[in-house]
Image (cartoon, helix red, strand yellow):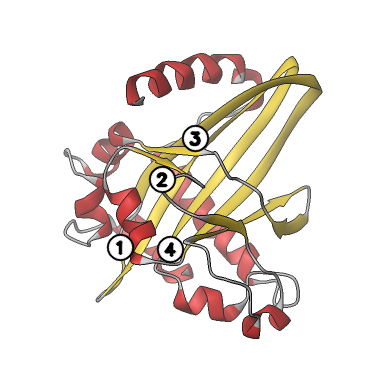
Amino acid sequence: MKKEFHVFYLVLAMALAPFAVQATEQDQVNQAATIMARFKALPENGIPRGILRDARGFAILTIAKGGFVFSGKIGEGVVVARTAEGWSGPSFVRTGGAGFGAQIGGEVTELVLVLNTPEAVKAFSHGGNVQLGGELSVAAGPVGRTADAGVMPKAAVYAYSRSKGLFAGASVEGSVLITNADANRHYYGRPVTARAILKDRVAPPRAASVLRGTL
């Protein structure tokens, strides 16, 4: 499946080139910090503090959607994990999807996946594909202060999105994310595995401190 996903991702990236701006790895890290700051600045309508406090990790992505008759999406971002020393450095991920429909124009969505369990973090540590709703249960995350004491069953992953200024829990079941090994190698200056990054066995670049501080 990994090879097929790489081929599909490249084809989709070319199809959506007019709607997506190529971001460097540091751009993606900085954007992830900005996204988390925005989500945390919405106490009445954002991610409940209890969920942020108990999170084992986060996947933070920017997804570009667009097309004319053919529609699709392509996303890039980072995964970070909570460790005994604080937060790990970022491990890069990407995602893509396609469909057919009367969609014209482009749209950018900010997506935050809250990793609620050690198993969720472990899934992103394998360095391959992670299918949401397959190996990991996923649900649209509860929103707002009143959800802190909610009785909703906890999924391994909670999903939140922000698009055109609107914030809500997101439905992402069936989405596939893949570790971007090339981006990890470029950002850390040598080949490193997602497992080593998320277990804090690799010292993150100093430029990642803004994201880690935001968390």
Q: Quadrant of residue 36?
A: bottom right
The residue to which callout 4 is attached is: 210
Identify which amino acid the numbered label 4 is placed on. Answer: Val
Q: Which mark is residue 88?
A: 1
Report if the CB atoms under discs 4 and 3 are less than 8 Å apart: no
Q: Nearer the viewer, residue 165 or 128?
A: 128
What element does badge 2 sit on?
helix
Please name which of the two marks, 2 or 3, marks the residue nearer to the observer.
Answer: 3
Give me the residue at 29% from left, 31% from top. 182
Q: Relative to residue 169, is residue 5 depicted above or below?
A: above
Q: Nearer the viewer, residue 63 or 212?
A: 63
Q: Residues within 10 Å of mark 2 (few under 14, many from 20)?
A: some
Residue farthest along the bottom direction in this orientation: 149
Give me the residue at 33% from left, 51% from top. 123
Q: Relative to residue 9, is residue 78 depicted above or below?
A: below
Please name which of the two marks, 4 or 3, marks the residue nearer to the observer.
Answer: 3
Q: Position of residue 187 (x, y in %)?
A: 29, 42
Identify which amino acid the numbered label 1 is placed on. Answer: Ser
Identify which amino acid the numbered label 2 is placed on. Answer: Gln
Tag count: 4
Please name which of the two marks, 1 or 3, marks the residue nearer to the observer.
Answer: 3
Rendered-image quadrant of the N terminus: top left
Q: Is residue 23 visible?
A: no
Q: Relative to residue 192, is residue 149 depicted above or below?
A: below
Tell me which numbered mark, 2 or 1, is placed earlier along the sequence.
2
Q: Is residue 99 left or right of residue 93?
A: right
Tell me which numbered mark, 2 or 4, is placed earlier along the sequence.
2
Q: Which mark is residue 95?
A: 3
Tell me which numbered mark, 1 or 4, is placed earlier along the sequence.
1
Q: Residues within 10 Å of mark 1 (few under 14, many from 20)?
A: many
Tell me which numbered mark, 1 or 3, is placed earlier along the sequence.
1
The residue to which callout 2 is attached is: 26
